[in-house]
Image: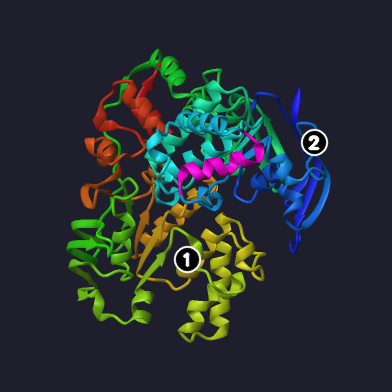
Amino acid sequence: MSVVKVSDVWWRYEGRREYALKGVSVEVEKGEFLAIMGSSGAGKTTLVLTMNGTVPQRIPGEFRGRVEVLGMNTAEHDVTELARRVAIVFEDPEIQFVMSTVEDEVVLALEPLGLSREEMRERLEWSLSLVGLSREFLDRPPLQLSGGEKQRVAIATALARQPEVLILDEPTSDLDPLGKEEVIAAIRRVRDELDITVILVEHESEYVADFADRVIVLSEGRVVMEGEPAQIFRRMDKLKKLGVYPPDVAELSTKLNLGVTTCRLEEALRLVSKLVKGVRTRALRGKGHKPGEVLLECSNVKHIYPDGVVALRGVSLRIHAGELVALVGPNGSGKTTLAKIISGLLRPTEGEVRLLGKPIEEYDRLHLSALIGYVYQNPDHQIFNQSVYDEVAFGLRLRGLPEEEVEKRVRRALRIFGLEGLEEEHPFFLSKGEKRRLALASVYVLDPKILVVDEPTTGQDMRFSETLMQLLKKLSEEGRAVIVITHAVPLASRYVDRMIVLREGRIIGDGGPREILTSPIASEGRLVMPQILRLYRKLGLDPSLAPLTVDEFLSVVEIAL
């Protein structure tokens, strides 16, 4: 029985020329776990917003077609009525919090249901328990929780209403590895213990392979692929063109022509372990990285915030020209604080930062911003102009460049970051992914010697994330230093020259990605290993040859076919 039926839906946001959805038809069966994948801007979030009536009831635009959820036409039944039976959890849980404690947040969601106090208490404790949160969280302010805890509270708030349909819109994209693990565990419990229909919007195919009964892939507002995970992920080349990358083990099974596409690590281990003859003894080639001159040096840098939080506890490092560096580690380890001190946005409580051999505080603000560009994790913190074009042009105009040169540089940056066609759009109306790219473009256009980028791939599809890392790598090879704060360790490991691992305000590791990921530092820093490396380790093969990609695995491991 279909509980969600989307029939030939077209939707265009007010002020946009292009339709976000173009004749989309989808049906979801009762109890099914459906995953929606596709590139950034493909229409995934717009599609799920039609399922709770937000589109077309709360957002202006042009709507055609029909959406029925649990027999209700979502254009005719009010959003508040639909919300009793359809719950949605967004990428950013903070936009859903309005109360001062976790208990009040969940109770607020229950009040419209007319439950007794005893029933509310039972639902409250049941929903928190389901996502792995204890009673100790009841009195805590939601906004002071970690990222993973916030998202679990948002899921618990949705589940407390006991909805028949639960929609999760990229629930792990803003989280560190620990937060992702917490939320994935919560989703797994929902999947195992509740007989509800779940619709998950997600970029990370490994999670989709774990949960989904069926996958649909959107591209430019249309459904272009549909099927079970194994069916979808075997179409590797087409998927990558659509911004969706299959799990490493699915790519491996396809390249080995095993006759079956394996999407899960344990299945791949059972199949591949029977075929492994050994390893080729030659070591993998290194990246051949030769650092250039020292551009920036930190000496025993400490930082204590006004509220007494100790963020850095004596950090010393050198950043060289021509290197791409990843700052990695769990949330709260000091990565962003260090990046802001490197960029001159914060001053250390103790220690010294020298840029090109000169104390960083001796540079005036305009000169410093031309030497070091900083891109915030939250793009709203740095975007303030009235159009996309003016945002990218602002820094160049501030420096008095001729308008002809401004236009040339801006057009190039817009092209590189996939923002062509949005020149006159107000940044407020951009998607979160588009805002991230706009923030990057506005700093990149200034051509700084050091570029510091905080979580650039969050919320982006894998195709753009790969393109972005390739671009950052190219920028470093041209003689700049590029520093990336990231939780996307499997992706970063394929491109960066160095990984600097922080935990609790200290550097606990500094070296090449292969060196870091095959040492105890990976576990201590809570780093997510590439899936192919986890498979290799489970096979018990020579750790000195540890592969970071599927192609490296095939070059190292001898397979009997």
Q: Is residue 61 left or right of residue 225?
A: right
Q: Which mark is residue 381?
A: 1
Q: In this view, does 288 lie above or below 240?
A: below
Q: Which amino acid does label 1 sit on?
A: His
Residue 530 visible in rendering: no
- In terms of secondary structure, where does tag 1 sit? helix
Identity of the residue drawn at 26% across and 57% down: 309
Q: In this view, does 415 lie above or below 510?
A: below
- In terms of secondary structure, where does tag 2 sit? strand
Please tell me which residue lies in front, 65 or 40: 65
Q: Is residue 21 left or right of residue 412?
A: right
User: In the rendered image, which quarter is residue 557 located in?
Assistant: top left
Query: Which percent across, then down, holds residue 345?
Result: 33, 70
Identity of the residue drawn at 73% across and 41% down: 81
Please tell me which residue lies in front, 86 or 397: 86
Identity of the residue drawn at 57% across and 74% down: 385
- Earlier sequence position, callout 2 versus callout 1: 2
| Pointer 2 residue | 72
What span is colored magenta in the figure? Answer: 101-115
